[in-house]
Image (spheres, helix red, strand yellow):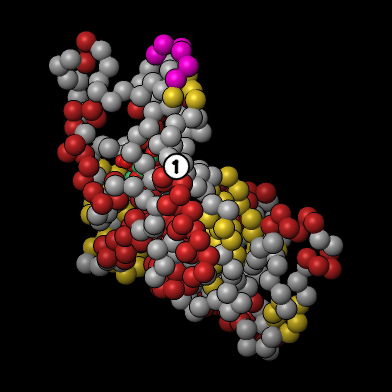
Amino acid sequence: MLRFTTAGESHGPALVSILEGLPAGVPLLAADVDTDLARRQQGYGRGRRMQIETDRIEFLSGVRAGETLGSPISMLIRNSDWKNWLEIMDPAPRDGDADGPRKRQVTRVRPGHADLTGLLKYDRTDARDILERASARETTARVASGAVCRVLLRELGIRVGSHLVHLGGVNAARPSVMPPDINAAADASPLRTLDAAAESEMIARIDAAKKDGNTLGGICEVVVTGLPVGLGSHVSWDRRLDGRLGQAMLSIPAVKGVEIGLGFETARRTGAEVHDEIEAAPGNTRTGHVRRTTNRAGGTEGGMTTGEELVIRVAMKPISTLMRPLGTVDVATGQAASAVAERSDVTAVPAMGVIAEAMAAFVLADAVLEKFGGDSLGEVRRNFDAYLARLDERVG
Ligand code: EPS
């Protein structure tokens, strides 16, 4: 139904995001996208690059007079840093290219990064040919397409938020009652966490890691409200929503784990301690007029949404560029060396939460269009409303 692709190198002229399959008539402004791009740039522990960039999109296609046209939506995000990298990243051959590698060649490959594996696979000699694309700068373009998907979901009363629940060994407590607008609350925190006490401890760990030339990972939780029961399907492996969400989350650079609901913890508990009991809840249309007394499943059963909150936790490893570098091999000489220490972030977990929201928004918008698809927003809305009316009718 829906597909998107991104292009662009970290220090190239620009990033591009193309989203295809959105219906016509969705109200869309550049500001809807820029808001999310700005949210992704926040977070204590980012490096100097984030002071250089102010990410903004230019629509190149697919939008007219503030509405989508149903045609591919393409968005351009210029890299402000490009002017400093022209000589190094110039797409055209330059004088001197024949004499040897360009400046800032990377051969002391970083353990944990795509440097070495990419270099061997693509048969390159300069790891910059790999790292420029493997860089998490690419996620800017994902957030752009995700932001457009978020607008479609919002039209149907579906909201995607996230908050940080772990950083560098420190857990944040999940509030017993989530704030009605999770992002408004989380965005007010420099780490996007809802636990102020944990936040000070996390900040201290980031400062210590920075001093030590080290980096930190963490976990964010994505929470989606307003979903109707029945997105995704049990009938085939590739239509199961959990699987689709898992793939999308694991595709985020440095993400190493995904849990839905209790996740790994379900394996340690008995059935009675895992499964959510069901009771009647008249008036609750989107769940089919029932309610789970708990939500350990995290909003899916049988590869389909239940209509309860969708809860996904996403784990990110520490960034692989360390200012106190790890041991490696210099691929130019074959000798032992210290890995390159390029400018980078101490942690980017708060940003990862925003990226995970974007990936969730994309997967869910795709599942929405699969079930309620139409060529215009009006048609999608009619299909959606008819389904909700049928859920009402079944109890009535
Ligand atoms: C990154 C290194 C840093 C980060 C970058 C990801 O960039 P630079 O090499 O220019 O200092 O800031 O992230 C972004 C630019 C971004 O927009 O998130 C890396 O090596 O992955």
Residue 39 to residue 154: above or below: above
Judge whether residue 204 can be spotted in this image.
yes
Residue drawn 15% across the image and 16% down it? 95
> Three-letter amino acid code at disc 1?
Asp
Residue beneath disc 1: 212
Residue drawn 21% across the image and 39% down it? 82
Q: In this image, 387 relative to 262: left or right?
A: left
Q: In this image, 54 relative to 391: left or right?
A: left
Q: Where in the figure is residue 42, as x and y percent of width and height?
A: 35, 58
Q: Where in the figure is residue 182, as x and y percent of width and height?
A: 48, 72
Within 10 angstroms of label 1, few (less than 14), some, or many (20 or more) residues?
Answer: few
Locate the C terminus by quadrant.
bottom right
Assess whether residue 39 is covered by the magenta stretch. Answer: no
In front here: 358 or 125?
125
* Most frequent secondary structure within the magenta stretch: loop
Q: Where in the figure is residue 283, as x and y percent of width and height?
A: 63, 88
Q: Which segment is the magenta one?
A: 332-337
Assess whether residue 333 is covered by the magenta stretch. Answer: yes
Residue drawn 67% across the image and 88% down it? 282
